[in-house]
Image (cartoon, grey):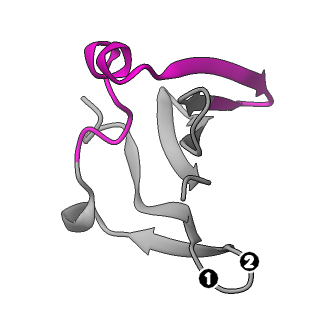
Amino acid sequence: MQQEFTHTPLKKLITVDAEPEPEQKIVFLEKQKLKFPIVPGKEKRTADGLEVEVLEVSNGIAKVKIEKPDTDYQVFYIFKLEACWFLDEVQDYSL
């Protein structure tokens, strides 16, 4: 399902552990470089102790945060509404 509803190339913001401070880098991933599922399913989220929060839905854009409390794991998923909702961007702030 995710393969059909993910824009490619997928824009992904990643955090690179650099000195003196971590920095963000943007990469564009073609379909053959994507590892599915991109958004972890409910069973995986529960097993890993991940929490989901819908931050905003407006003007055809939805932003969802998945994080693990008390860790540095924090990923935002940006969806755009066309005929259906498509994953358009991933912002991974985890170290």
Instruction: Name above or below for residue 95 compared with residue 23.
Output: above
Vertical side of 90 occupied by 87: above or below: above
Query: Can you give x and y, in whole percent of width and height, for residue 58 in the image?
Result: 80, 26
Q: Residue at x 56, y 31 (%)?
A: 67
Range of the magenta residues?
36-64
Quadrant for the N terminus in the image: top left
Residue at image coords 27%, 13%: 43
What residue sits 55% from the left and 30% below the top?
A: 66
User: Residue 19: horizontal and vertical position, in percent?
Assistant: 67, 86
In depth, the one of 64 and 6 nearer the eye is 64
Q: Residue furthest bottom?
A: 19
Measure how far apart labels 1 and 2 are at the Cα level: 6 Å
- Left or right, 53 with respect to 82, comes to right
Which amino acid is tagged 1? Ala
Query: Do labels 1 and 2 touch, CB within 8 Å?
Result: yes
Would you say residue 21 sits in the magenta stretch? no
Residue 5's disc number:
none
Does the magenta run of residues contain 54?
yes
Q: 18 or 59, which lies in front?
A: 18
- Mark identifier at residue 21: 2
Name the amino acid type tagged 2: Glu
Instruction: Please tell me whether mark 1 sits on a helix, a strand or a loop.
Output: loop
Q: State the residue in front, 25 or 95.
A: 95
Left/right placement of residue 54 relative to residue 49 reads right
Q: Position of residue 92 (x, y in %)?
A: 56, 53
Q: Residues within 10 Å of mark 2 (few under 14, many from 20)?
A: few
Secondary structure under the numbered disc 2 in the rendered image: loop
Give the image quarter of residue 18. Answer: bottom right
**The quadrant where residue 93 appears:** bottom right
Q: Residue furthest left?
A: 32
Residue receiving disc 1: 18
Q: How many C-alpha atoms fall within 10 Å of the one at disc 1: few (<14), some, or many (≥20)?
A: few
